[in-house]
Image (cartoon, rainbow, N blue to C red):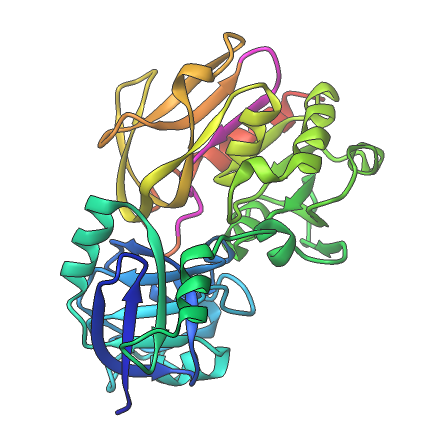
Amino acid sequence: MKKVYLILENGKVFAGTSIGAEGEALGEVVFTTAMTGYLETLTDPSYYGQIVCQTFPLIGNYGVIEEDFESNASHVKGYIVRDICDAPSNFRSQGKLDDMLKKLGVVGICGIDTRELTKIVRESGVMNGIITDSPQLSPDKKKLLDEYVIKDAVKSVSCKEKRVVKVKKVKKKVALLDYGIKRNIIEKLTKRGCEVTVFPHDTSAEDIIAFNPDGIMLSNGPGNPEENVYEIAQIKKLVKSGIPMFGICIGHQLLALAHGAKTYKLKYGHRGGNQPVKDMETGRVYVSTQNHGYAVDNATVPKSAKISFVNVNDGTCEGIDYTKSNVFSVQFHPEACAGPLDTGYLFDRFIENMEGRK
């Protein structure tokens, strides 16, 4: 196998072997603690612009199952694993992970000490990195590495045209604003009898209101929420319409910004399928799937709203209820594939809010 290197912005060099597509990968290095769900990770638009490190040492052991993909493409800039399985065992498997990476054009590296890399990111914070075939960077490449910033993330992953996901018996009509949608969000809605119309990220509030939906879903997505100035302005108008709204991940952050709150970048984010969140009303703790690098500043949440969930590990905001409107949001992923499914009931709450608006 070809020898390649991961070079971090701080100068640290890891030597490993090439997996996936040929070429170089430049991006923001992050890690996910998920033990399963590598297919969902690789196809989740929320990872746009990032080189993803899997902390679990063996990846690819259940093969490739296209039915589990969250989108039709991979949005990661690069992929890092300790060991990649070359002989997957799963009755659903359609092939090997390495072949999938090649097909999707994902440049990767394996055989490095992912524990050491994770410790560096935890202690120093997320930083840029490059997967390349030389342990030495030219001055031009070093400049690119140092100056890399994820830009236009939502714009880059959102759909370009409106589409409708039909159901046999329509109970409710939902307008879904696509900031980087995961398929399973749509699936959780259609299973509950919702006909989902997916709109591009830059659809005007006037067009959404004219569509006359029973509810509005604000999807997950990548990048710095504050750069989405137009989208935030539209959400402000949508909130005033009185239509029930449910925001997830960046949808949660954009709703908060539309209400005057602030967001900030976390040191190394929350990524994985084992993040504990506490329901502030009941005290119950749920295990959740998460993938985000930004958070809503607790101290800036307006008095007209209340924090509904907090992260047990660091106390960050994980959910907000807007008490003067039919709007709520969560930072984590209640659709959660490959699990856990503890918070799927939030989709039922959204349905109930739409029912209550008759």
Q: Residue at x 48, y 79 (%)?
A: 105
Range shown magenta: 323-336
At which x and y percent is residue 25?
Answer: 42, 72
Total numbered badges shown on the rendered structure: 0
Q: Is residue 79 magenta?
A: no
Q: Is residue 137 left or right of residue 348?
A: left
Q: Residue at x 18, y 72 (%)?
A: 112
Q: Is residue 328 magenta?
A: yes
**In this orientation, which residue lies closer to the viewer: 232 or 151?**
151
Report the magenta stretch's main SS: loop
Query: Does 8 sit above or below residue 93?
Result: above
Question: Could you say which quadrant of the image residue 285 lies in?
Answer: top left
Q: Is residue 34 left or right of residue 259?
A: left
Query: Does 162 sit above or below residue 344?
Result: below
Q: Is residue 246 left or right of residue 165?
A: left
Query: Does 232 sit above or below residue 339?
Result: above
**In this orientation, which residue lies closer to the viewer: 136 or 282?**
136
Q: Residue at x 52, y 45 (%)?
A: 220
Farthest front residue in view: 139
At which x and y percent is residue 45?
Answer: 51, 57
